Amino acid sequence: MRWQARRFDLIQIGSAQLTGKRSSHTSITMAPLKVAFLGPLGSFSHQAAAESFYKLSADLQPQVSFPDAFAALQKKEVDYAVIPCENSTNGSVMQTLDLLADRDGSYKDVKVCGEYYLTVHHCLMVRKGTYPGGWAEYDGSITKLYTHPQAWGQCEAFLTKYLKGIERQDVTSTSKAAEIVSKETTERGGAIANRFAAEQHGTDVLVENIEDRADNTTRFLVFRNVLDERTAEFKFEQPNPPTLEGELALETTHKTLISFTIDHSSPGALANALLIFKAHGLNLTSINTRPSLKKPWQYIFFVECGRTPSDENKEAVHKALNDLRQVTETCRDLGTWKDQLSASNA
Amino acid sequence: MRWQARRFDLIQIGSAQLTGKRSSHTSITMAPLKVAFLGPLGSFSHQAAAESFYKLSADLQPQVSFPDAFAALQKKEVDYAVIPCENSTNGSVMQTLDLLADRDGSYKDVKVCGEYYLTVHHCLMVRKGTYPGGWAEYDGSITKLYTHPQAWGQCEAFLTKYLKGIERQDVTSTSKAAEIVSKETTERGGAIANRFAAEQHGTDVLVENIEDRADNTTRFLVFRNVLDERTAEFKFEQPNPPTLEGELALETTHKTLISFTIDHSSPGALANALLIFKAHGLNLTSINTRPSLKKPWQYIFFVECGRTPSDENKEAVHKALNDLRQVTETCRDLGTWKDQLSASNA
């Protein structure tokens, strides 16, 4: 059984506040980096933020909503924000695209500076000490299961085989499910959540990797405020990026995200804009659209493109943006960062 | 006040089963067309189906889910399915794109044959007979409001001005809200739903057009089974399509939807595929993507393109499909239909 054979390779993070990093030239301790993520504590966003910044002094700050995280970054109340942008099974996260659309110019200094791939692993967990013998000695006495509605479907094979017929209670997040079973005293509850949530809430993990699909992965984008000098030099490297099985290594190693709007009454306008990427040797890797909200059936396009950095193409993005500004109504550079997937194939 | 001045111009539909249409050459009554829509009764999908087929004999059949509607059409249990594909404020409907992706080939004969634009209008409604004097004599005695969570935000100005502080109860659909207030006896409830739901459930409409945004419109696609000879000749014409204010008339009058997948390890593959549309004079009007679910970070692209029909370009779609098949991994023609928006500008 896959969920017995695999082991979840979690990077151990203690509390959110890590030790300050010292400069080699002075004895002054740098204030910890502040990193915004979408709460609650123990969420997949929390895990992604913790893993992205595990080498650094980082004060991880939960935010109630995506706009709160972006607003905190625009106001420089935080140094970074880690936001989910895409899931390999469910597709793009529309709230994130709407934030990036920035229709009223609230986040004009916020840009992407990195990405982080988090494979979605689920565990079955219970209140600490409930089953001292672990899964090997589990006696079938769990009476109720808790998780986010999406997680039931992601663990169907395991649930059908081992926990069939047990009452299921939907809750607002997998982390909330872990919290509920950590505190319960009157019933034998089980939660489906990630190991990170188990560590946050102090539950015992009975079985790891109970998900049906081993490759379900969420891509997070890391954002910074471009006016913040403190974060200008930091380069993100994911310690253990996922590999694309059976895939030839892509040469692309830098990605750029650009948004634009076009004159929809002009035939060929969209094709002309997309041609510019090809003309400058930028490979289109994804296209997304959201309503412009200015007029119905007009869109904001989000184009992600890649290039293998070389002396010849180091101005390619800059030149493409100049050309795009000639054929688009609005056009915005949303940042360039190192592709973590291609890095894993190098 | 806009919600007092406007009048909702609903096409009156009695029961779902209309009179059979007679052939001019024979006395045989044709069996009513069966049209699938996403239930419950009184939903916006029900309204779109009723208005799309109001001139014809149509037996409107509610379906529990989008896949149920497509399965019924593939099995020829129904003649048409009317499915929402895009909202002018919220963007594309992902469930519909996932159906169109048809990753396991379940719906290989289902294609688009028409579109229908439905402007989203909300009304405040109450149980029949509660306020015989109507809104003019309303005494402020409504104690509880019901609607779908999304509708509160769409009617914020009216609610803030006239119904501030009243308890709000979320329900699963606006139609369900109308049903609840139609049956209540112990409290004074108000529902926010469309006039169509009021007619379905027999409530009294107190105020019409209470929505904040006059242009919030949902585009529905009409699907048929291409092997069904009975529906081969029917051409959809929307009786009162919405006009695009301040917009020059687009010349495009036929739209085509094509899906394809590309070899993601080949740089330029997506740009090359998109170039083909331009080469054949097909104007790109929208692009959507969904995960391929074969490998992470690989996509199915949905391209909608348009052309003004002429003798010169009558083979354009056919030729573009042939060329696309040379540069894509998979490629599928999802249908051609008359653009109802451009018709309104003609």
Image (cartoon, coloured by chain):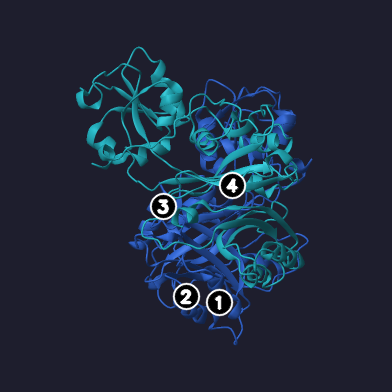
Chain colours: A blue, B cyan
Is the C-beta separation of discs 1 and 3 under 8 Å?
A: no
* Mark 4, secondary structure of its residue: strand
Q: Earlier in the sequence, mark 1 or mark 2?
A: 1
Q: Do callouts 4 and 2 point to residues on the same chain?
A: no
Q: Please state the chain letter of the residue tagged with numbered disc 3 in the rendered image.
A: B
Give the CA separation, mark 3 to mark 2. Answer: 26 Å
What residue did someone put label 1 on?
A276
Amino acid of disc 2: Val
Number of the front mark, 3 or 2: 3
Q: Do callouts 4 and 3 point to residues on the same chain?
A: yes
Crowd band around label 1 with a 10 angstrom C-alpha radius: few (<14), some (14–19), many (20+): some
Is the C-beta separation of discs 1 and 2 under 8 Å?
A: yes
Q: Earlier in the sequence, mark 4 or mark 3?
A: 4
Q: Quadrant of residue A219?
A: bottom right
Left or right: B103 as drawn, with respect to B236: right
Give the CA separation, mark 4 to mark 1. Answer: 33 Å
Which residue is most to the front? B25
Q: Please state the chain letter of the residue tagged with numbered disc 2 in the rendered image.
A: A
Left or right: B94 as drawn, with respect to B323: left
Number of the front mark, 1 or 3: 3
Q: Which of A242 and B98 lies nearest the eye of the viewer? A: B98
Give percent across and percent down for residue A112.
48, 66
What residue did someone put label 2 on?
A327
Give percent across and percent down for residue B214.
35, 46
- Which residue appears at 32% of the width and 43% of the height? B212
What residue did someone put label 4 on?
B114
Query: Does residue B263 show up?
Result: no
**In the rendered image of this protein, does residue A130 appear above or below residue A57?**
above
Amino acid of disc 3: Thr
Q: Quadrant of residue B120?
A: top left
Crowd band around label 3 with a 10 angstrom C-alpha radius: few (<14), some (14–19), many (20+): some
